[in-house]
Amino acid sequence: MTSEKYTVGVDFGTLSGRALVVRVSDGHQLASAEHAYEHGVITDSVPGSTVRLPPQWALQVPEDYLDVLRTAVPEAVEKSGVDPADIIGIGTDFTACTMVPVRRDGTPLCQLGEFGSHPHAYGKLWRHHSPQPQADRINAVAAQRGEPWLPRYGGLISSEWEFAKALEIFDEDPQVYQAMDHFVEAADWIVWQLCGTYVRNACSAGYKGIRQDGRYPSREFLTEVRPGFADFVTEKLDAPIGALGARAGSLTAQAAQWTGLPEGIAIAVGNVDAHVTVAAADALEPGHLVAIMGTSTCHVMNSTVLREVPGMCGVVDGGISEGSWGYEAGQSGVGDIFGWFVENCVPERYHVEARRRGISLHDHLTELASTQEPGQHGLVALDWHSGNRSVLVDHELSGVMIGQTLQTTCVDMYRALLEATAFGTRMIVETFVSSGVQVDELVVAGGLLKNRLLMQIYADAVGLPLSTVPSTQAPALGSAIHAAVAAGAFSDVRAAAKQMGNRTRNAYLPIAHHVAAYDRLYREYVAAYDWFGRGNDMMRRLRRIEAPEPVGATQ
């Protein structure tokens, strides 16, 4: 290149969107900006309505996503000091599976007056877990019929995914179901707004849309799931598939006005926040399990082999990068669990001391917990406060703490929860390995990297060298890398990742005597895991005792 060129990556998270300006030649990050969604996560009632939402609902307003383009992107570009004329592309990533019901022109139903009070007309966030009965029905019919795609998803489809969320609308609000022309991944909806073209990205379609070997589940299967649901794919879901790193289209005049970027620059095919991070880490080689740790954790990894792995979120050809089988697993709650504990379970004296020292309560508890040896607290916990994504795929499971006595402190419990999430990752790793998919290195990205105790616990409890991704905006960096490919700066994502991505290898190594202690503690975790997760339905029964009747769509 005769002069430096730049791309913009935009990461749409659970509560906000972040824009990052990146230099194409070396991946240097010049500036970023963040915009919090005005409506955040809607869990109580839809805006301007008295309609109460049932438990486990999580909705969003798609207009909030556009505000990220209008505010965070121009701010990041201004802060970077680069000439917008030197920006050659923009890439985006999204939480998944986040779904938006829209009309044929892409207008979300919730923006139409007649549907403003309908909860099902809003975007359904990834952690909208109420369609568990629909997921159960899909799984039961698929298992009974011996559907060939089911083993690709570890034998179970999640309530978080496209078909369960669509079936919930079909069951509970036929008016919304009939009115929506497309049920769109938010990852694809935002690209549609940028370039005017609806392209389904291969990642979301494969992992969340049950698309395998070029096909979705058959009409016959969908009819058996629910009479009248047979045409869901052809009428409301199917659209052209775009490969990751491909060009979805060009920035429209309207989107150029929103963002301040040059009209006509490349728009990359959409992607999922976890999967783009593999490129940011330059970890596209087989055996590098990338864990993106935040409110939840998503584990993604390339492999040269196709295997059936129980309880995985999916294996998709080209799901992370072309030419490899991309595997995905996950934990529904990680940072959310730590946040819940600090919010609800810590005595006032710890708050007072943290304030006196001028540090966060998390940092204070972490310092105290770091003085303990593994197993010293005598506790084992299950990290299911937001349900279990892998390997049980059941969002009606809940958290457990075993071993408490009158001597147990909040520091003990805090450390036990840190360890529980590490054991959850170990369960995923061991399930991969026992199924014939090798894991050699754990690569961590995300906001929890700053907790050094947590990282060392993961290295010790999982028993693998742990590398870290230095970028504090790894998904946005990954999106910027894909934008560079879409703009033609590199031949493929692998080449771009080598130039623009990086990780700190072996940042944490397992400590031998900690590994031995955690091996013993992990055996107790597995025993509790099997008893509560597979041995009985106590957690489901507890949810039923006081659970209210489902709220109708238009009460």
Image (tube, rainbow, N blue to C red):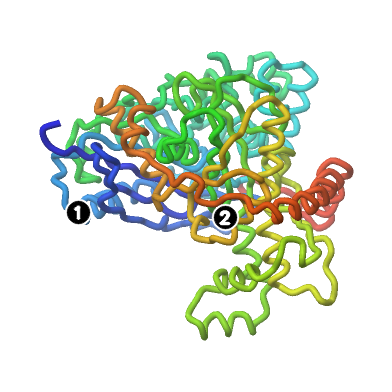
Residue 347 appears at what percent x and percent y? 68, 79
Report the side of 174 relative to 516 (left or right): left
Task: Confirm whether residue 466 shows in the render.
Answer: yes
Residue 355 appears at what percent x and percent y? 52, 82
Choose between 369 and 124: the one closer to the eye. 369
Q: Residue furthest right?
A: 536
Task: Confirm whether residue 43 shows in the render.
Answer: no
Residue 293 appears at what percent x and percent y? 54, 50
Query: Which amino acid type corresponds to the residue marked 2 in the rendered image?
Result: Met
- Residue at 50 percent across and 21 percent down: it is 324
Choose between 107 and 440: the one closer to the eye. 440
Q: Quadrant of the N terminus?
A: top left
Quarter of the rendering containing residue 103: top left
- Residue at 56 percent across and 14 percent down: it is 213
Q: Residue furthest left?
A: 2
Q: In the rendered image of this protein, does residue 414 appear above or below residue 398?
A: below
Query: In front of the other: label 1 or label 2?
Result: 2
Q: In the rendered image of this protein, does residue 529 appear above or below residue 403?
A: above
Crowding near the residue tagged with mark 2, few <14, some 14–19, many ≥20 C-alpha atoms within 10 Å: many
Report the side of 215 relative to 2 (left or right): right
| Count of marks placed on residues | 2
Nearer the N terminus, badge 1 or badge 2?
Answer: 1
Choose between 187 and 533: the one closer to the eye. 533
Mark linked to residue 455: 2
Crowding near the residue tagged with mark 1, few <14, some 14–19, many ≥20 C-alpha atoms within 10 Å: some
Report the side of 216 relative to 471 (left or right): right
- What residue would you read off at disc 1? 78
- Residue at 83 percent across and 60 percent down: it is 402
